Amino acid sequence: MEIVIGLIIIAIGAFCQSSCYVPINKIKDWSWESYWIVQGVFAWLVLPFLGALLAVPEGQSLFGLFASAPSFNLWMTIFFGVLWGVGGLTFGLSMRYLGVALGQSIALGTCAGLGTIMGPVLLNIFFPELNALESLTFAVILGVVVTLIGIAIIGIAGGMKSAALSEEEKREAVKDFNFPKGLAIALLAGFMSGCFNVGLTFGADINFGELTDPMFRTLPATFLVTLGGFVTNAVYCFYQNQKNKTWGDYAKTSVWGNNLLFCLLAGALWYSQFFGLSLGRSFFEAGGTMDTLSFCILMALNVVFSNVWGIILKEWKGCSQKTIAVLVCGIVVLIVSSFLPQLIG
């Protein structure tokens, strides 16, 4: 029963993340780079910091924890956050060219598989004495493989959509639809986004141990990863502000109230996935199959819900019943992938 509770919590976080782009549509008179960095202040700084404070027991300090943590692990956690930030930037572009459903599906699918495997592999390179590769059991590998199969099926549905629709119909669903360009960007986004879980792996012990509630133990590391990602995004967005001469966006006082509200909402929805991941993992056996595969499960469920939003937003409008059937088949495979490892583990 605890496994089910953990999965439900992770699923709620995934649903929130897949909904985070809806509030962005309500933002007025700001360029992409301006609203992206403002929502990032909430998503990658403010809310993760507040979440990390939940892991601090009475009489202790979060910054004291960071000061006492092994410097190598601390900086590797931030470093992989910086790399994840590159994935976050290209992630947005993948949806620009493929739409919410297909863009998130391919990017998050790649992220799910590589993110799950890269963490133990890289940790084993630097700390072979930890035997991190032992966590990559048959059940874990099978879960990753089934997840990637589900993503591939959804990718096939996307290819069928691209082939069947006229250019006018593609533009109606997704304004800048470009399948080849979007596919390349989505794969890059997925690879770099997988670094988030690598960062969490290196920061797994950055907490107060038994003094920290198990539900909040990964939140300090989550903050360090998002901090690194914020740096990457801030550099790029401010560069775009300078290049496009959009610094004036921040001076539009008439829209600040509206835009700040929806940026906060978008940031909160985005952060919910990793807050939910931390809470959900506490219901799994530490170091067990479900715990190791939890990041992959989160990404798979993100894909499921992003495609639900894709249907709601009519991104699959005009597709044949066969294409929709392939899409639904891929979604079902992803749902099964969340439970399969537990059934055979």
Image: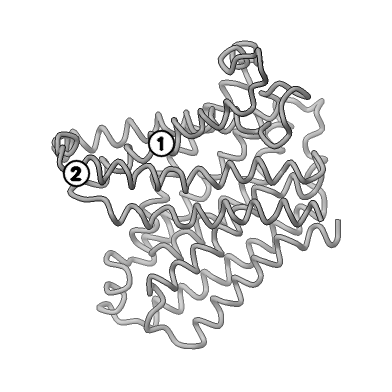
Q: Residue at x 46, y 79 (%)?
A: 160
Residue 123 position, x and y percent, is: 70, 31
Q: Residues within 10 Å of mark 2 (few under 14, many from 20)?
A: some
Q: Residues within 10 Å of mark 1 (few under 14, many from 20)?
A: many
**Is 237 placed left or right of 142 in the picture?**
left
Residue 124 position, x and y percent, is: 74, 32
Q: Residue at x 66, y 70 (%)?
A: 333
- Secondary structure type for disc 1: helix
Q: Relative to residue 67, is residue 96 depicted above or below?
A: below
**Residue beneath label 1, please?**
42
Query: Which residue type does callout 2 highlight?
Result: Val
Q: Nearer the viewer, mark 2 or mark 1?
A: 2
Q: Residue at x 65, y 51 (%)?
A: 9
The disc label shown at residue 125, or none: none
Gap in Å between the C-alphas at discs 2 and 1?
18 Å
Quarter-wise, where is residue 102 in the image? bottom left
**Residue beneath label 2, please?**
255
Q: Relative to residue 167, is residue 145 depicted above or below?
A: above
- Secondary structure type for disc 2: helix
Quarter-wise, where is residue 319 in the image? bottom left
Which comes sooner in the sequence, label 2 or label 1?
A: 1
Residue 103 position, x and y percent, is: 44, 60
Q: Are marks 2 and 1 in contact (CB under 8 Å)?
A: no
Q: Relative to residue 299, is residue 163 depicted above or below?
A: below
Position of the N terminus by quadrant: bottom right
Query: Which residue type does callout 1 highlight?
Result: Phe
**Is 109 placed left or right of 173 in the picture?**
right
Q: Residue at x 51, y 28 (%)?
A: 49
Name the outermost residue toward the right: 345
Q: Which of these two is toward me, 320 or 8?
A: 8
Q: Which of these two is toward me, 218 or 57?
A: 57
